Image: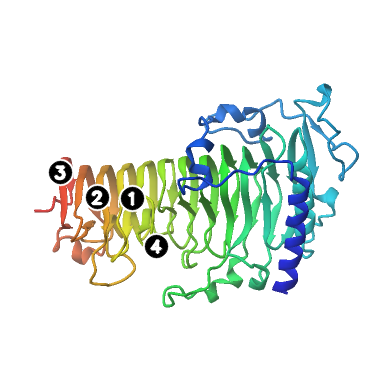
Amino acid sequence: MAIRFAAARGVILLGFALLCCSAKEAAPSPDGLPDALSPENQVDALSLDDFQDVLSPVGHGLPGEPPSASGLQDDPPAGGPQGSPPPGGLPESEKGKVTVFDVTDYDAVADAQTDNVEAFMRTWIAACHWRGASKVVIPEGKFLIGQTVFQGPCNSPDPIVVEARGTILAQPDLSEYPSPEWFMFEDINQLVLKGGGTFDGQGAFAWKYNDCHQNANCLALPTNLKFNKVNNSVVQDITSLNSKSFHFFVTNSYNFTAFNLTITAPGNSPNTDGMHLSRCHTVNLSYFTIKTGDDCLSVGQGNTNVNITGMYCGPGQGLSVGSLGKYPNEDDVKGIVWRNCTLNGTTNGARIKTWPGSPPSQASSIVYQDIVMNDVRNPIIIDQKYGAHLSKASRVKISDVVFKNLTGTTNSKVPVTLLCSELVPCDGIQMKDINLAYNGPPNFQHSLPLSSLCRRAKVSYSGKQNPPPCT
């Protein structure tokens, strides 16, 4: 089954490549950077205002703004579903209009049983090849699909919109996934994914095969939604449900914005990180509701200028920078800001984690501010022996980290743990206005006061400190 599927996918992608052969392929970066981060490929960051014409479907709008009443002018593709743009481009009368490509016009069936990969791919190829503004519509209903790649570059200078209104169901059979992603967007500039729909990974069929807690060479299960080299793009009003592994994985991308996402999986589901970032620059994430079995959000290696606000997390394992240092040649992490987040019943709160024995790298300019914790086990933690009990020290240098106005309750008697590296101690750690009350078993509440644990960390304190500072 895997061979059959891989072959079909290869035919589809080959057809796409032939259709889009006129699009100029980006040359590899001479300095070894990922294409999205190469200086010649970085463009001025777009704001949400640049996407106003495509962002607001009925019933949705930008955070704090009413939904658009005007809507978009939807026109059917010229010549029917298989239509192609006229030679020489669109006539002036057609410019500025959005052409709709509905997956059901390309034989997709919403019966939760028919595999719709080919129908989805043919829809995407037609929309991406269109020279004017285009929108892929996945209407209401339940559409079953296996591994799917929406790949660019696309022909239109306008943003390409994918409006998912229905429920997209992942094939539960793991043999349908030659690589560890289910639905991937790749090599696209100006993507808008919206619509209020749900991507259901049907992970309950696969979680029993996850043995990563005891097997270093474990099988990597598919991510629900992966974005690779997706620049100047927006994701809004999407639900990710029961992913087999990560819900969202964003990598090698620039100027990526996501808001109003709902991420849900059981608290005991393994490796179901809500969103993981890797090698991204200029990322804005806001107003997620995350209930999952691993990190609610994890900021991995090579990320810079990341702003995260308004997250609700729980159950889950907290708001993490890392893990860092597991692999050779990891890039530095710098400029990660978390603000106005709430954690409820999570294992960890504000966490930075690095592997022991790691290659050298740096994590700096990190801020956790205005975070509310409710019954969080480890509210503030730096762990530089994450993932193993090796004697070798981590060589990830952590510096300039601010924990400011972190309040709430904990069920731990040691709410602050800063365990830094013997080789590269932590510098510039600031604790400002920390107020965490114990909410554990009452028989311990009065007999054992709260305390902080610090090893090889240079820490400064200001404002209220509960637990007391390290001595």
Q: Secondary structure at mark 3?
A: strand
Dot 4 or dot 3: first in sequence order is 4
Q: Secondary structure at mark 2?
A: strand
Residue sitting at 44 percent across and 61 percent down? 294
Residue placed furthest toward the front: 30
Numbered mark located on residue 436 in the image: 2
Real-space CA distance between mark 3 and mark 1, rounded to the nearest whole angstrom = 22 Å
Label 4–label 3 contact, CB within 8 A:
no
Real-space CA distance between mark 3 and mark 2, rounded to the nearest whole angstrom = 18 Å
Specify the amino acid type for callout 4.
Tyr
Horizontal relation, residue 95 to residue 449: left or right:
right
Real-space CA distance between mark 2 and mark 1, rounded to the nearest whole angstrom = 8 Å
Residue linked to disc 3:
460
Specify the amino acid type for callout 1.
Met
Residue sitting at 27 percent across and 65 percent down? 385
Q: Is residue 230 above or below residue 379?
A: above
Q: Tell me the quarter of the picture where residue 190 sits.
A: top right
Real-space CA distance between mark 4 and mark 1, rounded to the nearest whole angstrom = 32 Å
Camera-side residue: 166 or 76? 76
- Can you give x and y, in whole percent of width and height, for residue 61 in the image? 60, 33
Real-space CA distance between mark 2 and mark 4, rounded to the nearest whole angstrom = 35 Å
Mark 3 vs mark 2, foreground winner is 3
Crowding near the residue tagged with mark 1, few <14, some 14–19, many ≥20 C-alpha atoms within 10 Å:
many
